[in-house]
Amino acid sequence: MNKKHVFNAGPCILPQAALDASIEAIKDFKGTGVSLLCISHRTKEWDATMDECRALWKELLHIPDDYEVIFLGGGASLEFLCVAMNFLEKKAAYLDTGVWASKALKEAKAFGEAYAIASSKDKNYTYIPKGYEIPTDLDYFHITTNNTIYGTEIKTDIDCPVPLIADMSSDILSRPVDVSKYAMIYGGAQKNAGPAGVAFAIIRKDALGKVTRHLPTMIDYRTHIDKLSMFNTPPVFPIFVMNETLKWLKGIGGVEAMHKINLRKAQTLYDEIDRNSLFVGTAVPEDRSIMNICFVMAPGREDLQDEFLAFSKERGMVGLKGHRSVGGFRASVYNACTQEDVDALVACMQEFEKLHK
Ligand SMILES: Cc1ncc(COP(=O)(O)O)c(C=O)c1O
């Protein structure tokens, strides 16, 4: 079998070291003689994994002491609802940068006045709206920093006069973040942080407890903070793999070193898209994501789309088909995707161009 280059949008490629450690732990968790899949979560060995994982998040993102990191089931989609229940008393604004942002807003509307302050829907979300003013009477302002489907990204931590809440599902741990600018950062783990099955939330503790509604125990973030994410049975296997993924990230020099690697990978691919006569990028250049790189066939060459998908598949490329709402191709170049994977894709695009010039 030829080598696969995995560009899946999530679940996606994970570091080989994390996969190897997980395979070993399924056979024997930390020398206990019991598989990771069969251990009790009420053991000192498991406590140590949870502690290590929490500590790595704090270390890698330089999370200030007044924040806590929690691990939750239900994915980012459940957090759309929990965010609103925990923070929305009267009014919140959302930046509408795509389907995930719209879904988050839809959930919030059930709990108070929630609206889109600006939207890039007019151009199928190919840019990040700018020039809007954030009112000071909001309970919070919600952004989606990386728009997985459209390949746009808010690459800097914005100044916000009200609590800022960010869905960072698809760019967390890809670049340094000033956590102190956010009341909460959350996301599904299944891109840079680990496999599917667990969500993460980084919450400034004093931002909680401001709503008057009754919060069911499992919805109340304070439950999970107080119980160190062990109020109920945690998703043991995904958290284990997450911990191994974070250990790998620390080993390569942390988020700062990863960011440099990611910038180079993204630049390599965008340069080829801009150079190659057969392809064009879909996101406006200044808002291009360094995680999800979206492109289509150049005008007049659309008939080659299926042929390129088959051609690239033969050369080991996996997961290049774009989301149905954008079409074309999407290369998700998350942390564990290597420069070698990107170079292989570029070589494939060049070879295809030679065939069709
Ligand atoms: C930016 C973003 N937010 C939210 C989600 C939804 O995540 P989940 O499937 O964990 O609910 C996704 C999924 O791809 C995403 O990319």
Image: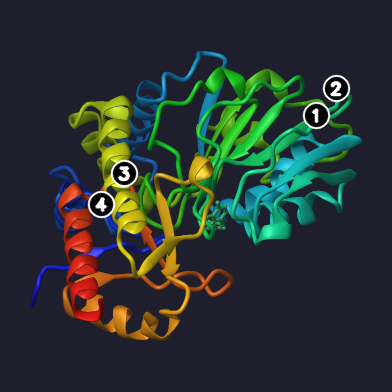
x, y (%) of residue 45?
A: 27, 37
Q: For the N terminus, which image quadrant?
A: bottom left
Between disc 4 and disc 3, whose residue precedes?
3
The residue at which mark 2 appears reads as 136
Kind of residue at badge 4: Cys
Is disc 3 surrounded by few (<14), some (14 to 19) or many (20+) residues within 10 Å? few
In this view, the mark in front (3 or 2): 3
Between disc 3 and disc 1, whose residue precedes?
1
Distance from disc 4 to disc 3, alpha carbons, whole Å, reads 14 Å
Residue at 41 percent across and 79 percent down: it is 301
In this view, the mark in front (3 or 1): 3
Residue found at the far top of this picture: 65
Distance from disc 3 to disc 1, alpha carbons, whole Å, reads 31 Å
x, y (%) of residue 223?
A: 64, 35
Instruction: Report helix, strand or loop for mark 4.
Output: loop
Between 126 and 200, the one nearer to me in the picture: 126
Distance from disc 3 to disc 2, alpha carbons, whole Å, reads 37 Å
Distance from disc 1 to disc 4, alpha carbons, whole Å, reads 37 Å
Kind of residue at badge 2: Thr
x, y (%) of residue 349?
A: 24, 67
Is disc 4 surrounded by few (<14), some (14 to 19) or many (20+) residues within 10 Å? many
In this view, the mark in front (1 or 2): 1
The residue at which mark 4 appears reads as 337
Distance from disc 1 to disc 2, alpha carbons, whole Å, reads 9 Å
**Relative to 311, 46 lies left or right:** right
Instruction: Report helix, strand or loop for mark 3.
Output: helix
x, y (%) of residue 98?
A: 65, 56
The residue at which mark 1 appears reads as 133
Q: How is the image coloured?
A: rainbow
Q: Quadrant of ligand 1?
A: bottom right
Kind of residue at badge 3: Gln
